[in-house]
Image (tube, coloured by chain):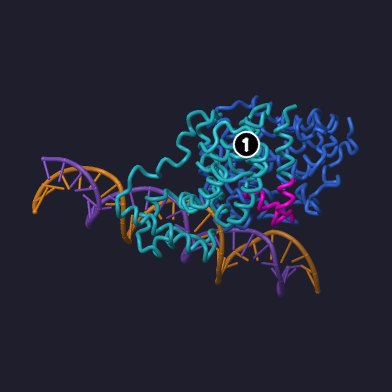
Chain colours: A blue, B cyan, C orange, D purple
Amino acid sequence: MTEPLPHLPVSQERDPLDGLLELIPTPDDQPRLRADAARNRTRLLEVAARLAGECGAANLTMEGVATAAEVGKGTVFRRFGDRTGLLIALLDHQERELQSAFLTGPPPLGPDASPVERLRAFGAAVVRHEYAHRDLYLAARADALRHHTIPATLLRLSHLCMLLRQAGARGDIELLAQTLLGYLDITLVDHLISRRGMTLERLEAGWNDLVGRLVAVE
Amino acid sequence: MTEPLPHLPVSQERDPLDGLLELIPTPDDQPRLRADAARNRTRLLEVAARLAGECGAANLTMEGVATAAEVGKGTVFRRFGDRTGLLIALLDHQERELQSAFLTGPPPLGPDASPVERLRAFGAAVVRHEYAHRDLYLAARADALRHHTIPATLLRLSHLCMLLRQAGARGDIELLAQTLLGYLDITLVDHLISRRGMTLERLEAGWNDLVGRLVAVE
DNA sequence: AAGTTCAACGGACCTTGGTCCGCTTAATCA
DNA sequence: TGATTAAGCGGACCAAGGTCCGTTGAACTT
């Protein structure tokens, strides 16, 4: 029941991420985009989403997207940097839904619930969300090295730090948050479910247990 | 001080990995290898290790290795499957050192220490080991999706399960072990150290704290 | 020793991610 | 409205991972 900053974005909170988090709510993507470039960008995203849906995100090729969008290959790379960049951009829409849910949505996920309730709800929400869209998330995650620096990850981390602090957790908050975040890794979740036969319910129970242990004041 | 099976490989212990773990102590790599194939294999590994040392594992190319070893490209792929397979094979040597240290080595890592001591020592050992060889480990980890199924990972997981059980930890042991393993992820460790400015000491302190929380009987 | 077989070999070939650079054109300004 | 400029564009080009298949020769059989 202690929410010092209800309905305020997380980055307002003191967090261990130095100044790096100012740029978290996606400061605009690009300062400004020429009309044709913006048009191409949305066309490319539409086409890419369609192709990913039809053939699976794993089979998405940059040239395929370019051709289907009737655009040069260079244009795709200019806009999104690389394949992973395109995949992350594709995820952005769904990611924003999740973000608004835990930043400003109704309880138990949103700010009108106790920190511990929010922590518990956060795990269930993220696991279910990523698992539901695992095709894209796994494809984007193939990068591995970039994962810890993408905005969505930083936002989740920052949010966890805030909730842990609000919940009165003792210890190295940033490391505790990283531990929690690691538990939600889609490659782990997918592996546990599809290879090890676990259920979402079991993973959620494990999350709740973990939250309890990490939040314990003594 | 409770080591029911000192000096015995972990896989003898009841663990949550079904029958999958019988094949952990690397059952031989290949049943048998034709003389020329075996010769090529070791030459390839030597050459690859040298090249990785000179130019960095990230810049290792399959064709480069093949050429330097005076062997056809197809031979490299036949032997190691793909680039990640080669990198994993390269790591095998160092990985074995680590494994023998925590399976049969002296305390506090080896079996002549209490489970909790071994757990604490395990974290420090793995973090330092992987960080010391991060060039190769990070390159091999670029795969991301394969990580949870490679033998070295399964062995570490199984070992953690055993220690947790011996330490009397309550709860979903496999998930607790996965949580601990996630904390040791080299991509995370590297990020925290080189991007977030943390020290190995801080990571070890965080590990010890985490072990304490997960092992707590009540 | 000769024959048989099949793993191993090699390198041409294909695919795809990513770069480069000369051309085009939207946006801005005088 | 015409000139200027730099972002945007396209597709040829390169690099590297991965596949294929005809050939070679190690190992085993008789």
Instruction: Answer whether residue A136 is visible to the viewer in this image.
Output: no
- Which residue occupies the foreground of this view, A187 or B199? B199
Residue B156: % across, % down: 57, 40
- In the rendered structure, the residue with mark 1 lies on which chain? B
- Residue B171 located within the stretch drawn in magenta: no
Q: Residue A58 versus residue B61: which sits nearer the camera?
A: B61
Mark 1, residues whose alpha carbon is within 10 Å: few (<14), some, or many (≥20)? many
Residue A90 image point, x, y percent: 63, 44
Screen quadrant of the N terminus of chain A: top right
Quadrant into which the C terminus of chain A falls: top right
The image quarter containing residue B218 is top right
Task: Report the residue marked by disc 1.
Answer: B178
Q: Visible in this render: residue B47?
A: yes
Q: Secondary structure at mark 1?
A: helix
Dominant secondary structure (helix, strand or loop) of the stretch shown in magenta = helix
Q: Which residues are magenta?
A: B186-205
The kind of residue tagged 1 is Gln
How many numbered marks have been drawn onto this rendered protein structure? 1
Q: At 61% from the left edge and 47% from the top edge, which residue is drawn?
A: B126
Place residue B44 in its image quadrant: bottom left
Q: Nearer the viewer, residue B68 or A118?
A: B68
Residue in the image at 68% along x and 42% along y: B120
Image location of residue A21, percent across then percent down: 79, 50
